[in-house]
Image (cartoon, grey):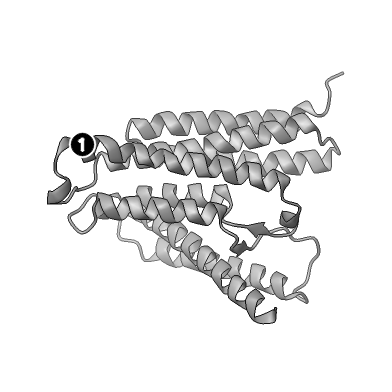
Amino acid sequence: MMNKRFIPNAATLSNLICGCIATGAAFHGHFTTAFLFILCGGAFDFLDGFLSRVLKAPSPLGVELDSLSDVVTFGVAPSAMLFTLFTKVCYPSFMSNGFWFTLLPYTAFLLAAFSAYRLAKFNLDTRQHTGFIGMPTPACAIFWGALISGSLDYLTSLRFNAPFLFLFVLLSCFLLVSDVPMLAFKFRRLGVSDRLDRLRYGFLVVAALLIICFALFAPAGMVWAYVCKAIAIIIGLYALLGFGLLYAQRREE
């Protein structure tokens, strides 16, 4: 009889495969495909934990596989998207020589390194059972996937350039390993009596309304791009909400 632990592990490995496909697509400049497979990996990442709880089949092997898969899907894949984007963005005149054009794309892999560090830290941090400390790697990966897929024309225009992109990469790395508290959407009960539950429900409602509005008012043929823009904005609001929670915590102390 098949060990029931294989079922959630199969979902975890599917997450890993999605991350590998996303990485390959990103290196070939197929950003939409890469983003879609990052989203598929995120779905499998949710599914493996769900199946593990339903089947009552947690395992140390599953924990290790989950972290390794997440490094690929939410660390390496968005880094590959950024690497390719660095070869397409504008470079200012003082960076117009081959040195910067060769060097800066490789800074994209800082995101993979910090994602790996964040995942290892998460596994050891007992404070993160009901909430997150720092930006979750799926949120960071989805932000970059959505931003690049939905706003490539702007990112490769004269209004944006490689130094700005590098600074945003550094900001993402900081958020991954920071002590900024972030909401975890783990609803252990129905109702909105708890302040954090009200925030979770409210945020989800705002996120849904943003996506619907962007989709409804998108120009013809631009629905996917506008939905991606909405997703990137939602992740940005999620990060800002974390800073709001940090401010509230410090006021209470």
| Quarter occupied by residue 116 | top right
- Judge left or right: residue 202 versus residue 58: left
- Judge left or right: residue 214 versus residue 164: right
Q: Quadrant of the C terminus?
A: bottom right
Residue plotted at (61% across, 30% down): 14
Residue plotted at (81% across, 33% down): 59
Name the foreground residue: 245 vs 203: 245
Q: Quadrant of the N terminus?
A: top right
Name the foreground residue: 53 vs 174: 174
Number of marks in the image? Answer: 1
Residue 112 visible? The answer is: yes
Say if 84 sits above or below 191 in the image. Answer: above
Residue 31 visible? The answer is: no
Say if 81 sits above or below 126 in the image. Answer: above
Query: Residue 90 at what x, y percent from top left?
Result: 19, 48
Residue plotted at (53% across, 34% down): 72
Q: Of helix, strand and loop, which one carries label 1?
A: helix
| Quarter occupied by residue 243 | bottom right
**Disc 1 designates what residue?**
99
Query: Residue 235 at what x, y percent from top left?
Result: 50, 60
> Disc 1 residue type?
Phe
Query: Residue 247 at what x, y percent from top left?
Result: 59, 76
- Judge left or right: residue 232 versus residue 222: right
Residue plotted at (69% across, 28% down): 10
**Are there few (<14), some (14-19), or many (20+) residues within 10 Å of tag 1?**
few
Tell which residue pokes out farthest to the bottom in this image: 251
- Judge left or right: residue 130 versus residue 119: right
Name the foreground residue: 223 vs 238: 238
Tell which residue pokes out farthest to the top in this image: 1
